Image (tube, grey):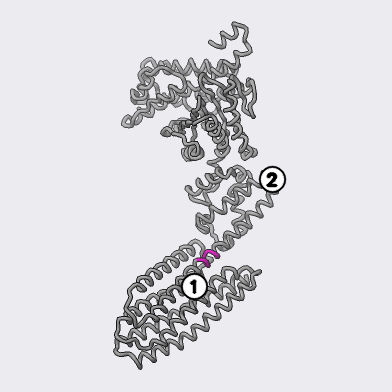
């Protein structure tokens, strides 16, 4: 009617924008009515489930008939049809709204299609709607050569959006706008400032077209995001309040979108599922954000606009990363990419998973086998760090117009570094274990020096705790070897070093028992042997620490220090053999009873066995560094 009045008073130039705006409003009402039919059918199929009223959707699209809120609850299944009281009224409304929607863009093609789909609408005066007829009405993918009401709605919506763009009275930083008030323009500009700041990250992908208009008391901003038909974001701004309505076929991307807006502290309605294409699900959510003042409102709109580019091809990127990371880690990676304003589009344009797989083929060697995921070999944390580098490097490559071959070389070099990192990590674990062995040796020596004083149980508890910590390190090493069998040599190396930890912990326990005897024989040779173990464990720790740097061939000093420490461990093992014999000799000559004799000889054996274990571990590490790393 507004269009007719404008034409009658000679303002025909305004009639078309008004008609397009009215037609877009009719589009919202048609979609509500189609969803109402689908939700009613869903309730008829599962009457035990609560029926959705769709009241919010009704009010949002401007339909005042509250009786429609009970429509879904009254639906029942009857054979091959649905019993829906007053369904004839709903179908009649759909026909009226279709005519209003088509009016501004009605050409011969659309007129013929409109007549056909409206002629196919049943009268349903008996309140029965055949299930097959409902499916034919609501499907967006009719058979080849066919048509459907839903398909026509979608095609008309596209034409109306194009007409709206063509009729724009002004452009605000790229947004096609009409019917705005002076107060609306700063809000549109704020949204576009955020959108334009990150829009380049979509690179060659279409999307992010924005229109803005005033509808009653609301400023309405609509963005097309990308090409996915059920992917829609509509923003209503009234006073200091922002309401964003978002639909998506992927519930995980919907939750991702909600996460993106966390800084704006929106209040989200419960996500509601609906149906698409006769069964495929899509999801709808609505968030409301209240600002304290106009500056906060514009900041919120700017942030919202800046996040939309990170939705484009989000699910495709998640699938591309499937062979590299588990799902939660993939989503965390994409969140990081959005937070850092890196995004996933450059990664996809430059090959996606293929870019990484080519680097794996060129770099991994025997570290990976068919069927392995990168995270199964490097671990989730290390793989995530590597992929953050890949996403950032890909974006830098396209932004700076660098060569893709340079990117491939950088990715290969970075992956090689991460594979080497696993060796460094294992050497780091070995160093941590060596420090525990040194603490145990020091504890054993201090317990020897304390013999003759009051017995103290604390060293026993401390020794047990240190030995348990050492066991956990060994378990971590074996878990890594399970992922990286090319580092299997670290298993026997840590096993030997852990024998030293076990022997020293048992020595601390035996020393506590010895301290409870009346006199302490063989004190001097025992102190000598315990001191040798402290020195040997210290040299072992030095060797492992130097080994972490000795693989760098430019570090000749570290390599030499490593070899000196290994040689020193061997020399100390020979000295420990002599010291252990001295303990045995003194025990035989000085022990007051069999108990003391047993404790002293057992102590000597445990300490000497710990020395042997350190020598064995040092030889394994020496052979590995000389044979596979320095000569490799």
Q: Secondary structure at mark 1?
A: helix
In this image, 197 relative to 279: left or right? right
Residue 417 forms part of the magenta stretch: no
Q: Which percent across, then down, holds residue 119?
A: 49, 16
Counting other residues with Cα less than 10 Å from the Cα at mark 1, is it few (<14), some (14-19), or many (20 or more)? many
| Whether residue 253 is visible | no
| Whether residue 290 is visible | yes
Q: Which percent across, then down, holds residue 622?
A: 56, 75
In the rendered view, would you say 550 is above or below 353? below
Q: Which percent across, then down, holds residue 20?
A: 57, 18
Q: Which residues are magenta?
A: 424-428
Indicate the quadrant where residue 285 lies: top left
Which labelled disc corresponds to residue 493? 1
Q: Main secondary structure of the magenta part?
A: helix
Instruction: Tell us which disc is closer to us: 2 or 1.
Output: 2
How many angstroms separate mark 2 from mark 1 (CA)? 47 Å
Front residue of 301 and 458: 458
Which labelled disc corresponds to residue 400? 2
């Amino acid at each position: 009617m507004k269009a007719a009045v404008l034409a009658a008073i000679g303002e025909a130039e305004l009639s078309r924008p008004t008609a397009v705006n009215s037609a877009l409003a009719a589009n919202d009402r048609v979609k509500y009515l189609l969803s109402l039919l689908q939700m009613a059918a869903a309730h008829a199929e599962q009457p035990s489930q609560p029926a959705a009223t769709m009241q919010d959707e009704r009010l949002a699209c401007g339909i005042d008939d509250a009786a429609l809120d009970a429509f879904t609850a009254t639906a029942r299944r009857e054979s091959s049809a649905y019993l829906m009281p007053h369904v004839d009224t709903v179908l009649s409304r759909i026909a009226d709204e279709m005519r209003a929607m088509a009016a501004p863009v009605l050409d011969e093609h659309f007129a013929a299609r409109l007549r056909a789909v409206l002629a196919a609408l049943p009268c349903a005066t008996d309140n029965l709607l055949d299930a097959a007829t409902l499916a034919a009405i609501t499907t967006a993918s009719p058979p080849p050569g066919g048509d459907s009401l839903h398909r026509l709605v979608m095609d008309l919506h596209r034409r109306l959006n194009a007409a709206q763009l063509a009729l724009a009275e002004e452009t605000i930083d790229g947004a096609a706008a009409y019917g705005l008030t002076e107060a609306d323009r700063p809000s549109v500009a704020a949204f576009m400032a955020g959108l334009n700041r990150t829009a380049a990250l979509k690179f060659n992908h279409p999307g992010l077209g924005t229109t803005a208009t005033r509808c009653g008391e609301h400023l309405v901003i609509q963005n097309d995001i990308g090409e996915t038909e059920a992917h829609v974001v509509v923003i209503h701004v009234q006073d200091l309040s922002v309401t964003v309505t978002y639909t998506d076929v992927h519930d995980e991307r919907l939750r991702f979108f909600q996460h993106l807006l966390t800084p704006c502290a929106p209040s989200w309605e419960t996500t509601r599922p609906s149906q698409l294409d006769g069964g495929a699900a899509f999801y709808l959510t609505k968030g409301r954000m209240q600002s304290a003042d106009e500056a906060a409102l514009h900041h919120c709109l700017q942030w919202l606009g800046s996040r939309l580019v990170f939705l484009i091809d989000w699910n495709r990127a998640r699938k591309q990363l499937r062979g590299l990371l588990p799902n939660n880690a993939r989503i965390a990676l994409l969140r990081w990419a959005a937070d850092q304003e890196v995004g996933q589009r450059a990664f996809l344009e430059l090959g996606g998973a293929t870019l990484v797989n080519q680097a794996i083929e060129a770099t991994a060697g025997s570290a990976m086998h068919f069927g392995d995921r990168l995270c199964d070999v490097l671990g989730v944390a290390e793989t995530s760090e590597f992929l953050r580098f890949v996403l950032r490097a890909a974006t830098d490559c396209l932004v700076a117009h660098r060569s893709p071959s340079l990117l491939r070389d950088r990715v290969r070099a970075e992956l090689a570094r991460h594979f080497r990192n696993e060796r460094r990590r294992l050497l780091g674990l070995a160093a941590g274990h060596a420090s525990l062995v040194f603490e145990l040796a020091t504890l054993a020596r201090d317990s020897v020096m304390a013999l003759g004083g009051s017995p103290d149980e604390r060293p026993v508890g401390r020794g047990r705790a240190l030995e348990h910590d050492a066991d956990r390190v060994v378990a971590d090493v074996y878990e890594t070897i399970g992922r990286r069998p090319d580092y299997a040599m670290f298993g026997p190396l840590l096993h030997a070093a852990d024998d030293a930890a076990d022997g020293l912990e048992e020595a601390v326990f035996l020393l506590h028992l010895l301290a409870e005897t009346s006199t302490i024989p063989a004190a001097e040779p025992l102190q000598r042997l315990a001191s040798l173990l402290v020195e040997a464990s210290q040299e072992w720790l030095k060797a492992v620490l130097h080994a972490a740097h000795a693989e760098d061939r430019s570090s000749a000093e570290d390599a030499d220090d490593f070899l000196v420490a290994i040689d020193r461990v061997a020399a100390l093992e020979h000295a420990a053999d002599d010291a252990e014999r001295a303990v045995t000799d003194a025990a035989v000559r000085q022990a007051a009873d069999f108990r003391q004799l047993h404790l002293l000889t057992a102590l000597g054996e445990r300490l000497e066995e710990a020395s042997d274990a350190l020598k064995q571990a040092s030889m394994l590490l020496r052979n590995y560094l000389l044979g596979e790393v320095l000569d490799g």
